Amino acid sequence: MIEDFGQLPDGTPVQRINLRKGSLEALVLTFGAIIQDLKFNGQRVVLGYPDLAGYLSDHNYMGAVVGRCANRVSGGVAVIDGKAHQLTLNCDNRDHLHGGTTGFSARNWSIEQHDKASVLLKLVSEDGDEGYPGRAEVLLRYTLTGGGALRVKMTATTDKATLVNLTQHSYFNLDGSATIADHSLEVTAERYLPLNDDLVPTGNIRNVAWTAFDFQDGRKIGASQAHDLNYCLADNPRDSVEFAAALEDAAGDMRMEVWTTEPGLQLYDGGQMQSSSVGHGGTSYGPKAGVCLEAQRWPDGINNEGFPNVILRPGETYTHITEFRFS
């Protein structure tokens, strides 16, 4: 089912698609390709807002797809084939973050196909958009499977060499508690990327052993330690999805697994979250209200030799598949 969900300031209508299959229900917006709501066996598992106004005033990328390049690009500079491209500096006027001021999370996508359990969205990003070279065409399909999984498949093509690194930026909270501090998290990665003061990778790669970032054996996220960093799942994208992480609610009644083709997983525990809008159920979201598990290429890959490739060239197809499996 498709219904109206308000209008953007320029009068462009936003639509909402209702998906349902088995134990899962999802509400998807054309604005930002946002997952507005997701329920497993009737239990809401994501943060979100009940109206469009909440998303228009939000600065947390709530439930959205971010791009053309997710995460940070140091200095906003991308050198491709010897030519430097200056991207929008929308992060403290120093770096480029999540595709710029009006990245994919702030665009209205078009509905190409839909049925009861799946929707295909499309977005065209023109040459020069936020400083990126090339005209990029992006297709995104959300699919609910009979096995209790939300499957996210994103593909992109371009007519000039450019950067493409997309991710889904939903905040998960499996039991509706005020914070996810008592949720348990497992991340399979043995390595992570240390950050500088601007939260940009230093270029080094470290082992998680004996650090506060080690979630290999599964443990509570906790209230004191802030987490906003990339885990290195692999050195390159995989041909098929592999197990990357698992999240469980405090009582152990619900489990969500993340399976992905991507070589990186950004863990952001919402430690800096602030929202002036009222969320689902009249909730006001504060620090650690939800956790993001963002499958992607390693951050700032364009500026770090040896990081997974983030350059997409004409004739190639970027492909990213992530599955969120609930039980």
Image: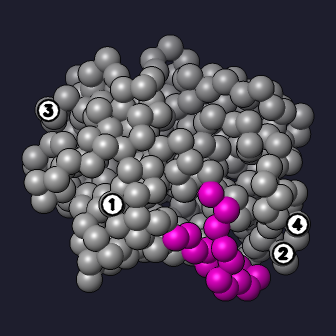
Question: Under tag 4, what secondary structure?
Answer: strand
| Crowd band around label 1 with a 10 angstrom C-alpha radius: few (<14), some (14–19), many (20+) | many
The image shows residue 320, relative to residue 232, as above or below, that is: below
Q: How far apart are labels 4 and 1 at the CA level? A: 33 Å
Q: How far apart are labels 4 and 3 at the CA level? A: 47 Å
> Measuring 10% from the left and 49% from the top, which residue is drawn there?
306
Q: How far apart are labels 3 and 1 at the CA level? A: 28 Å
Of the two numbered discs 2 and 1 in the rendering, the one whose residue sits closer to the viewer? 1
Location of mark 3 (residue):
204
Q: How far apart are labels 2 and 1 at the CA level? A: 34 Å
Circles 3 and 1 in contact, beta carbons < 8 Å: no
Q: How far apart are labels 4 and 2 at the CA level? A: 7 Å
Specify start and end residues of the magenta stretch as a single range: 107-124
Location of mark 2 (residue):
2
Q: Amino acid at mark 1?
A: Pro
Sequence-first disc among 2 and 3: 2
Q: Amino acid at mark 3?
A: Asn
